[in-house]
Image: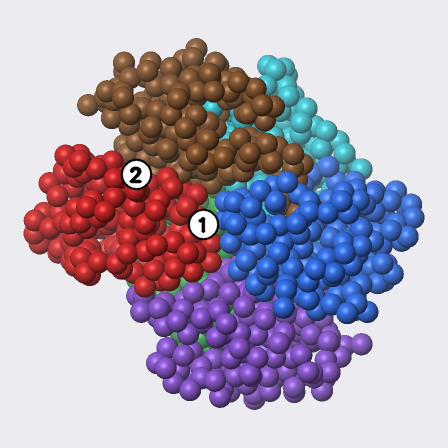
Chain colours: A blue, B purple, C green, D cyan, E red, F brown
Amino acid sequence: MTRGFYIGRFQPFHNGHLSMVEQIADDVDELVLGIGSADDSHTTRNPFTAGERIMMITKSLVGYDLVTYAVPIEDLERNSVWVSHVQSMSPDFDIAYSNNPLVIQLFREAGIEIRQSPMFNREVLEGSEVRERMISGGDWESLVPEAVVDVVEEMNGIERIQMVSESDSNTNDS
Amino acid sequence: MTRGFYIGRFQPFHNGHLSMVEQIADDVDELVLGIGSADDSHTTRNPFTAGERIMMITKSLVGYDLVTYAVPIEDLERNSVWVSHVQSMSPDFDIAYSNNPLVIQLFREAGIEIRQSPMFNREVLEGSEVRERMISGGDWESLVPEAVVDVVEEMNGIERIQMVSESDSNTNDS
Amino acid sequence: MTRGFYIGRFQPFHNGHLSMVEQIADDVDELVLGIGSADDSHTTRNPFTAGERIMMITKSLVGYDLVTYAVPIEDLERNSVWVSHVQSMSPDFDIAYSNNPLVIQLFREAGIEIRQSPMFNREVLEGSEVRERMISGGDWESLVPEAVVDVVEEMNGIERIQMVSESDSNTNDS
Amino acid sequence: MTRGFYIGRFQPFHNGHLSMVEQIADDVDELVLGIGSADDSHTTRNPFTAGERIMMITKSLVGYDLVTYAVPIEDLERNSVWVSHVQSMSPDFDIAYSNNPLVIQLFREAGIEIRQSPMFNREVLEGSEVRERMISGGDWESLVPEAVVDVVEEMNGIERIQMVSESDSNTNDS
Amino acid sequence: MTRGFYIGRFQPFHNGHLSMVEQIADDVDELVLGIGSADDSHTTRNPFTAGERIMMITKSLVGYDLVTYAVPIEDLERNSVWVSHVQSMSPDFDIAYSNNPLVIQLFREAGIEIRQSPMFNREVLEGSEVRERMISGGDWESLVPEAVVDVVEEMNGIERIQMVSESDSNTNDS
Amino acid sequence: MTRGFYIGRFQPFHNGHLSMVEQIADDVDELVLGIGSADDSHTTRNPFTAGERIMMITKSLVGYDLVTYAVPIEDLERNSVWVSHVQSMSPDFDIAYSNNPLVIQLFREAGIEIRQSPMFNREVLEGSEVRERMISGGDWESLVPEAVVDVVEEMNGIERIQMVSESDSNTNDS
């Protein structure tokens, strides 16, 4: 049995993420999706809460023949202990997946196998593209799984991201 | 669709927890199991990491006809914001389940429906009973689902809890 | 113009605190009441929030001819920076008042004048006495200013402290 | 009895803030002024400590026929629990006042009435205008209440903001 | 070149610690002394600051032919990342020394060689013995190196520990 | 006996720092080198851990006739308590050395003697120059003491800084 670990912020979970999961599914029997910056929400870069992102991921992967775990990972703001933190929050895994150079370096220094993929660039680009379309009123729906559209609409996510994007302060005070 | 939220430390997930889940399953379509004190581990009271507890819960509930989510909830050490913290980390829920008076009070003040159960007392008692048997070499296996026995053995959990129970210091220094 | 600083948890503000304020009023023109452990609430020892304690203090001192400031002081859990923390949160003060040996030592090491009073012992004793009476249903009302009775009743404080006193866990999980 | 809550950083408290308070005074009997980023100081954006800001506010509002509370609110860096945090630190309030879109969104999601005002834009602009004039040696005194001039001069505030504005590091190390 | 790591709170550094260092000196060329609970001070259990403990250690080891490093290790309150935290704060080491079962378990799980010693029990016992004698006015001087006597006297350490031991509160409020 | 305190991030320790130490050595008998942002690492601005920086400093100063202490100082993110924090972590000192205006202001407000030096500008400039050369593959070796070259090479520091500099995210998630 092989278990993989795939870290992302999933703000929101989109088709690029989905493609990555499909690709990783060829390597592993089970997959942990680590939800990074889990404690951040209500910002332009991180509009959705960890709970909302769990819903997006779980509902999007419901038809897939892959055991998945969606696990919130709060920021510790300390790179030197980040791998240990991830390991304590996640079911044990054999391979990590990321294209982020910092993440790759941290896993390598910890002696954990890490795999990259050309898909990742697409994924990163699509994250901000989706959020920008949400803010400007563009077609974001075509970039995400249908389940994500449902989750975002149910919690009035477009109103939220549009509101917080107007705020130039990140400290909640005028 | 009704979703419930059941908070516990699950150190480890045992038969009392399982009975509770079976009972709650009559009320709800989906159930979030909030793993409290997720950032604590390697102590007599909290021997297992959040990741290990996710495995125990997920493997134990694999045959049940209930959509479940196992979500780590790190301690914030601040009762007044605890309900908001839980809500941000968890998929949205309609009813909370607990027999802990503090938890009940906090949910009530937040205007969230909270249900109690006589099963809870059994559950609390069994938690420390299981850990004491693990430490003293007694029969803990009969008090937990088989999947939990597997998880504990795979990660040498008995050795760990026996070691940390000898430590009278909780600050990692001799 | 002389300003004093009087630190307490004020759980709740009671007649012993009031006597202390009356006594300090002879020394100073203005008085800062620092509300210690401001981030703690919903426990047997700290049942009330900082906001509720501000109300108790302000309403109790409304008829007094003394300029007062009620200032929440969150715990930093680090004695060596505690005086600097207090100084940054409080209007500048000339004299500190306390009978707590640790507080006295910390202010002394920082070179700040600190005064003790025999009233303080009464004050400390009354704090737990009031809370015990609240829990057991005794006469706590006679030990506190009338304004405090109003504040506690308005927020259902007796129900809260009775509930949380039943909870043997301080980690919000059953 | 109606109590309002008005959040700001008040760095420093200026005439725009004062106008807002005067306008809010028509709606409410009592007003809580929540001092945001209370734990920040000695930076260009947040030059003054919470204690210094309490003095500015209290002294500026001394002649007004309005019960006011100046309450420091430390940053929690977690938007999802921010409203609960504010509620625990502040006397209970009925209406919140802000023009900050993030603050408005957070209060709305929490089901709390929030009111905006055209005055807010003036207020925000004046905040940085005042600080820039302090740094460049311009006429900042005409933009703030007289009491604020006194507070700033007494604690050598101009020297402080001019010094820290020269520092391009926010980590206290060269 | 072999470097060892020896963790302790060193409250204060006493003859038992010194014997341990002498014994470890046979194994290694260099020794890191990790000062645990570095952020704690002014309590009965942790009376001295990290800086004061650095002085005690450095002055006590001045005549020894061993390269030593005294490194403060702040508490992270999270056992699962503790080893990574220690590794990031300390020069790289080959062998850890401790008799604390929790520390041993954490290093073992991280795959780091850890050595125990019968000396450790003596060391632990002497720590509280020294502090008790300091509080009660007994002969603590004979249990510590001369350099420690100098450091404690210079900073009025006996007065400090006697004062804080009278305080039954660890939250700085009466 | 005079002891100085010199704060820096030492990312890495370079010839500018060394010149400063040589200059300070004329004033003092002992020197504490406070390693700022000790908890930060694996970023372009702070590539090295505190432990790695202790090694750089200690090895570089081995031939100097000056008692030195290399002390990690973790960020507290609160300017108002920073001086107290530094004082608790460091052996007692008489004079602080810095050219950073914020540091100078904080020490001045605390009543501690602080000295500036024209050398500091060189030092600051060289810090980023060294890191840029490390990233681009330029000649960084000539800007640092030989002992630093050894430390960086031994821990594959160039690979690390080149990897993390590619990462545009500081939150460890793609």
Disc 2: which residue: E1
Assign the N terminus of chain B to one quadrant of the image: bottom right
Side (left or right) of F132 relative to C81: right
**Residue that appears at 87% across and 51% down:** A143
Side (left or right) of F127 relative to A115: left
Q: Please state which of residues F144 and B70 is positioned toward the viewer in this rendering.
A: F144
Assign the C terminus of chain B to one quadrant of the image: bottom left
Q: Say which label, 1 or 2, has the lower sequence index.
A: 2
**Residue that appears at 39% across and 59% down:** E108
Is residue C18 visible in the rendered structure shown here?
no
Return the x and y of residue E23 as percentages of the image width and height: 18, 49
Query: Which chain is disc 2 placed on?
Result: E
Q: Please state which of residues E62 and C81 is positioned toward the viewer in this rendering.
A: E62
Task: Identify residue type, mark 2.
Answer: Met
Query: Which chain is disc 1 placed on?
Result: E
Q: Residues within 10 Å of mark 2 (few under 14, many from 20)?
A: few
Task: Identify residue type, mark 1.
Answer: Ser
Return the x and y of residue C69 as percentages of the image width and height: 48, 45
Return the x and y of residue D101 as percentages of the image width and height: 76, 44
Question: Looking at the picture, does residue B135 appear above or below residue A86?
Answer: below
* Secondary structure under the numbered disc 1 in the rendered image: helix
Side (left or right) of E124 relative to B87: left
Return the x and y of residue D149 as percentages of the image width and height: 56, 25
Question: Looking at the picture, does residue C9 appear above or below residue D120?
Answer: below
Disc 1: which residue: E84
**Residue that appears at 36% across and 67% down:** B164
Q: Image quarter for residue C125?
A: bottom left
Question: Looking at the picture, does residue B128 appear above or below residue E64?
Answer: below
